[in-house]
Image (cartoon, rainbow, N blue to C red):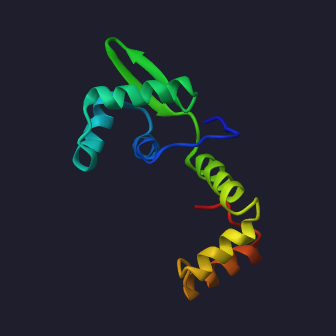
Amino acid sequence: MKRSNHVSLSELQIALMRVLWDRGETSTADVVAALAEERGLAHTTIATLLTRLEKRDVVIQRRDGRQLFYRAAVAEADVRRSMVADLIGSLFAGDANELLAHLVEEAEIGPGDLARIRQRLQSGGGNEK
């Protein structure tokens, strides 16, 4: 899977990509089926989204006869990193500490969460899921 410098996705595109990240290579029909219950989107809508993501090098397309198969070309962690960097840049003037302060002030992070964050900082980690 290639590393992408900048990938920004809509909420619907992220839902679609999660299917690919979870399943690996899968057909358009399987993506439609996976998203049908929560989204109720038409097959053509999913096909269009996949085609657009393929043109952006976010997914890789493979044809087997008449059926198209897709797999993610970018890792979930890379998309998350890119989108969080955009958020920090646009809303917090590039200061990640301001994002963390905002989360703490808005009670999005509780005492148990802070302990886990401290542990990650002390271990030099933060890259694991």
Q: Is residue 17 above or below residue 84?
A: above
Left or right, 79 with respect to 123, comes to left
Residue visible at 74% across and 74% down in the picture? 121
Residue visible at 76% across and 59% down in the picture? 94
Left or right, 107 with respect to 27, comes to right
Left or right, 53 with respect to 65, comes to right
Could you tell me residue 99's position as x and y percent? 67, 69
Could you tell me residue 78's position as x and y percent? 63, 47
Residue visible at 71% across and 71% down in the picture? 98
Could you tell me residue 9's position as x and y percent? 52, 43
Residues 58 and 68: in front is: 58
Q: Residue furthest bottom?
A: 111
Which quadrant of the structure image shows residue 41?
A: top left
Q: Is residue 90 above or below residue 98?
A: above
Q: Residue furthest top?
A: 65
Could you tell me residue 30's position as x and y percent? 30, 34
Report the label total.
Answer: 0
Residue visible at 67% across and 73% down in the picture? 100
Q: Quadrant of the N terminus?
A: top right
Q: Is residue 76 above or below residue 32?
A: below
Left or right, 43 with respect to 14, comes to left
Q: Quadrant of the C terminus?
A: bottom right
